[in-house]
Amino acid sequence: MSSQNSKVLLVYSGGLDTSICIPLMRQEYGYKDVVTVTVDVGQPQSDIEQAAEKAKLLGTEHYTVDAKEEFAKDFCFASLQANGDYQGYPMSTSIARPLIAAKAVEMAQRLGITSFAHGCTGKGNDQYRIEFGIRSLMSHATIHAPVRERNMTRSWEIEYAQKNNVPIQQSLEKIWSIDENLWGRSIEGGRLEEPDFAPPEEIFQWTQSVEKAPNAATEMSIQFKKGIPVSLNGETLSAAALVIKLNKIAGDHGIGRIDIMEDRMMGLKVRENYECPGSVVLLKAHQALENLVLTRDEIRFKKTVDLEWSKLAYEGLWWDPFKTDLECFIQKTQERVTGHVKLKLFKGQTTVLGRSSDWALYSEDLASFDSTTFDQRESTGSVKNFGMQPRMFQHLAEKFKTQM
Ligand code: ARG
């Protein structure tokens, strides 16, 4: 083995799957040194600290990369501009993976490493997203996925961890598999994957139950510039700060609990639970503003573009030229998505109270019942000719009814 690939870079979260990869890389994969990288995309600070502590204990060269602002700006808000949604899920986990892969590659390049390892299982979507990301940015990368390659079970992992002094106390207590970032929180595992199992209240951490949500509504205003939220109630905030703040406000009102049947990339149908308070509110507000400023045809066509974009984002195909093609259209439309949206947050619901923009395709003078600018009589001709072909068909159908 050359000195260049005696080191492997492990994409590290500090959880059981990635932690056992550390001794595995040394004992089973023959690497002398393991470098661990944890990318901070807004997961709890305690997770990041624990990952660093474990890495230290297990003797890796460890790095934490703060990518929160980049994640919010270039991934969450890019998704917002595309009304990013997959089967009712704002794709919080999905859109974080390309950035995690990019940061891992950036670090590997800095350290002269070309071998990677990750802890994704062979059942989920993340393996596709992470490996596509790494290979797109470093075509000659070698990637190891021990959990998948060795078809591991949780009990095997726990036993292996115990034998190799990998701390697992936390993992033993954890019933749920949680993935968290600024755009949302996903809770999986245990009985939660059964379609007919009602999610227990204990799985939720960001959102209040509707029953316990306050009886008084919160009204707020969000300002958008070119499809990007820039201020909350008049307070200008950085991308990450805005999302964090909104997660708290909307979560307290019980907004953003999502319970869906999700079709994973390989076709597995799995029940998924999410908490996405901030993203749910922003998506609603963004769409309300688009509906004010875009033409009818733009709105109709953008639904198709958004759907295609979302499929690519769900699959982690962040560096697909098709995505860039779609973004050319999306960006052009967003030039006018500038203005304010007023909202009411109450008992799990987000209601749009109002929207305004200099680009509004709305004229009070034309739409009003009292307007005289719009001479109603001028509609007569177009109304008379409306639906000419289907009307002709109806008359023919009537005429030939007896012969049919
Ligand atoms: N099903 C979601 C996705 O593929 C979330 C998966 C990760 N969630 C987790 N708790 N590990 O985007």
Image: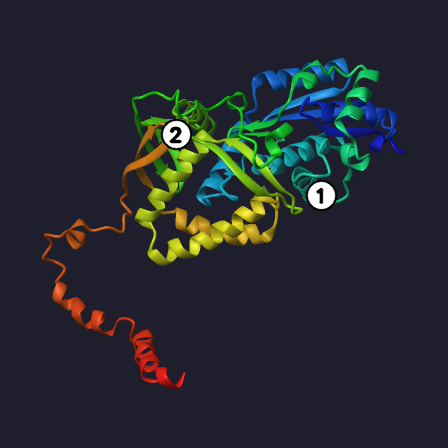
Q: Quadrant of ligand 1?
A: top right
| In the depicted structure, whether residue 356 falls above or below residue 326 | above
Tell me the kind of residue under disc 2: Gly
Badge 2 vs badge 1, beta-carbon distance below 8 Å:
no
Q: Earlier in the sequence, mark 2 or mark 1?
A: 1
Q: What residue appears at the point 82 percent right and 34 percent down from the top-left corner?
A: 150
Q: Is mark 1 within 8 Å of ligand 1?
A: no
**Residue 39 quadrant:** top right
On the image, the x and y values in percent for residue 71 come to 54, 33
Of residues 119 and 212, which is closer to you in this image?
212
- In this rendering, the count of numbered labels is 2
Q: CA distance from mark 2 to mark 1?
A: 41 Å
Give the percent coordinates (x, y) of residue 348.
39, 29
Which label sits on residue 135? 1
Q: Assess disc 1: are there few (<14), some (14-19) or many (≥20) residues with their C-alpha within 10 Å of its C-alpha.
A: some
- Secondary structure of the residue carrying tag 1 is helix
Identify the residue under disc 2: 348
